[in-house]
Amino acid sequence: MALLSILMVTLFQLVVIYLLLLIVSFASKSLQPIIYAAIFFFFLSYVGVTIILPFGKTFLQLFEPLPGSYAKLLIGSVFLFYFSELISKHIAEAGYESVASIAHIAIKIAILTLWLPQLSMLLDTLSKFIIK
């Protein structure tokens, strides 16, 4: 029931944001991209905190019995990649495709950096099997 109320509030806020963007588009064409970007990032952070983080915590609890931190890394990597994709698309639509691609590459490198300790442990284990 609480999830339904959160979703209804989110839907209502989407309608309010849409109406606000329509008003801004008629009132001031020059400020529209700035206000659109601010509203996009504000709403993205709101959705992240109210919906995605609780979902992620619940989803991680499903994988607690598994050994290692592979589930946490995998789920975290998916969320980071998804947010990177959203932000990159937003930046590319604003006309800055080169900045969007650099930001997306930076997030991919950050995800790989998160996996490096697990990868090094895996390579150590494989090298021990090969040597024996």
Image: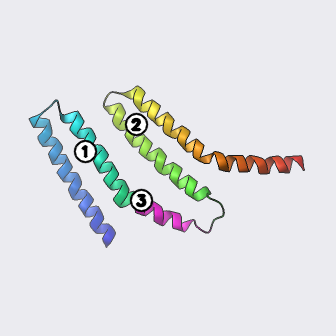
Q: Which mark is residue 88?
A: 2
Left or right of 94 on screen, residue 31 = left
Which residue is at 25% across, 45% downward?
39
Neighbours of disc 2 within 10 Å: few (<14), some (14-19), many (20+): many
- Residue 82, given in percent of the width and then of the height, sits at 44, 46
Numbered circle sitting on residue 53: 3
Q: Given the image, on which type of amino acid does mark 2 rest?
A: Ser
Are there few (<14), some (14-19), or many (20+) residues within 10 Å of tag 1?
some
Q: Which residue is mark 1?
A: 39
Image depth: mark 1 or mark 2 in front: 1
Instruction: Find numbered disc 3 in the image and state the secondary structure of the residue it sits on.
Output: helix
Label 1 – label 2 distance at C-alpha:
16 Å
Who's the residue at 49% across and 63% down the image? 59
Q: Of the residues shown, which amino acid type is indicated by label 3?
A: Leu
Res 97 → quadrant: top left
What residue do we see at 61% from left, 56% from top? 70
Q: Which residues are magenta?
A: 53-65
Q: Helix, strand or loop at disc 1?
A: helix
In the image, is 90 to the left or to the right of 131? left
- Residue 47 in the image, given as x and y percentages of width and height: 33, 55
Q: 114 or 27, which is in the foreground?
A: 114
Residue 34, quarter of the rendered image: top left
Where does residue 127 sit, x and y in percent of width and height?
81, 46
- Between disc 2 and disc 3, whose residue precedes? 3
